[in-house]
């Protein structure tokens, strides 16, 4: 079976309103020979509404970078999954910056995954080990723990609304991507865990690689058997480099 291919741009806390709308318009105007990949952007939460208006009716999907795990209440400054779902198709959970900068635990990530699915969105669940964990030989154990924990409350009937992004923490924003062979090994491992939990439905979920993907390394990464596209940070802020990465995914062929 052929799995969906996805290229997602995580804009993080970058770009003002005008630049966000302009970049979104440029992304929707990317001229594509073959549209075999989904394209998804994650602007800053405050600019989701104007970006949504700018890309309406185009091939570009819109995602929220973060949300609260509770549906509503006295959580000053927070945004619920249901609020995001009014304009977004997708939401992220478990990004390494949420885990390591904001101290989000596996349990909180799991609750956010549940909240995102309950709100009717697809979840892009990020997992990945730190350098110390990799050097200690624990990369697979960490990723398995993160996956199993985050998916504890996701039954087989909902796994088709989950996309996994394997993002080694040491590769995010460092300019040092995993080698295609190492990224493939870990994405294959992610797929095995998904299969173990959810049989073929789990095995068939898209598994993306993220961490210093650029136009120079995207093709080789995306041509790996178990890598179904990428979650792109820095290189998604420039439409020329994002376009080259989308093109690499569109052309990747696993048959
Ligand atoms: C990310 O933010 O998820 C990411 C992969 O960033 P970068 O591409 O800049 O490493």
Image (cartoon, rainbow, N blue to C red):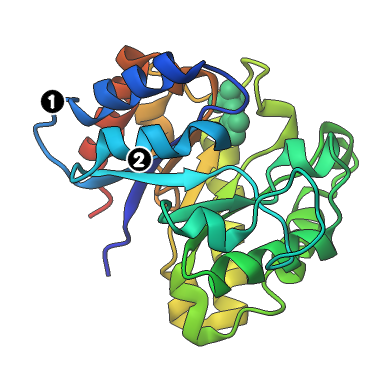
- Residue occupying the point 60% across, 39% down: 182
Which callout, 1 or 2, points at the residue further toward the start of the chain?
Answer: 1
Q: Nearer the viewer, residue 210 or 57?
A: 57
**Residue 52 — which label?**
2
- Residue occupying the point 73% across, 70% down: 148
| Image: 3 above or below 43 | below
* Secondary element at tag 2: helix
The C terminus lies in which quarter of the figure? Answer: bottom left
Residue closest to the far left: 33
Q: Is residue 189 left or right of residue 158?
A: right
Measured as percent of width and height from the top left, residue 49 is found at 42, 39
| Image: 91 above or below 32 | below
Measured as percent of width and height from the top left, residue 122 is found at 47, 62
Q: Ligand 1: which quarter?
A: top right
* Secondary element at tag 1: loop
Q: Is residue 45 visible?
A: yes
Q: Nearer the viewer, residue 181 or 88?
A: 88
Answer with the quarter of the image where residue 217 lies: top left
Measured as percent of width and height from the top left, residue 212 is found at 56, 23
The N terminus lies in which quarter of the figure? Answer: bottom left
| Image: 57 above or below 160 | above
**Residue 72 — which label?**
none
Q: Is residue 189 left or right of residue 23?
A: right
**Residue 31 — which label?**
1
Q: In this view, does 238 lie to the left or right of 112?
A: left
């Amino acid at each position: 079976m052929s799995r969906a291919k996805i290229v997602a741009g995580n804009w993080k806390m970058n770009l003002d309103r005008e630049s966000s709308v302009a970049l979104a318009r440029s992304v929707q105007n990317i001229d594509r020979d073959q549209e075999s990949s989904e394209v998804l952007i994650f602007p800053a939460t405050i600019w989701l509404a104007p970006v949504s208006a700018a890309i309406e009716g185009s091939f570009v999907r819109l995602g929220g970078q973060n949300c609260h795990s509770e549906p509503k209440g006295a959580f000053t400054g927070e945004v619920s999954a249901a609020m995001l779902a009014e304009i977004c198709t997708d939401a992220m959970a478990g990004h390494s910056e949420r885990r390591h900068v904001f101290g989000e635990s596996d349990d909180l990530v799991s609750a956010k995954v549940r909240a995102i699915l309950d709100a009717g969105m697809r979840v892009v669940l990020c997992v990945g080990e730190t350098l110390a964990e990799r050097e200690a030989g624990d990369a697979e154990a960490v990723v398995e723990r993160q996956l199993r924990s985050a998916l504890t409350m996701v039954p087989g009937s909902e796994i088709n609304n989950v996309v996994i992004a394997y993002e080694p923490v040491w590769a995010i924003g460092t300019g040092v991507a995993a080698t295609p062979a190492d990224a493939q090994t870990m994405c294959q491992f992610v797929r095995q865990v998904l299969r173990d939990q959810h049989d073929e439905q789990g095995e068939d979920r898209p598994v993306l690689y993220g961490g210093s993907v650029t136009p120079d390394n995207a093709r080789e990464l995306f041509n790996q058997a178990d890598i179904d596209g990428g979650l792109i940070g820095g290189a998604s802020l420039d439409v020329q480099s994002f376009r080259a990465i989308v093109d690499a995914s569109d052309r990747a062929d696993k048959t």
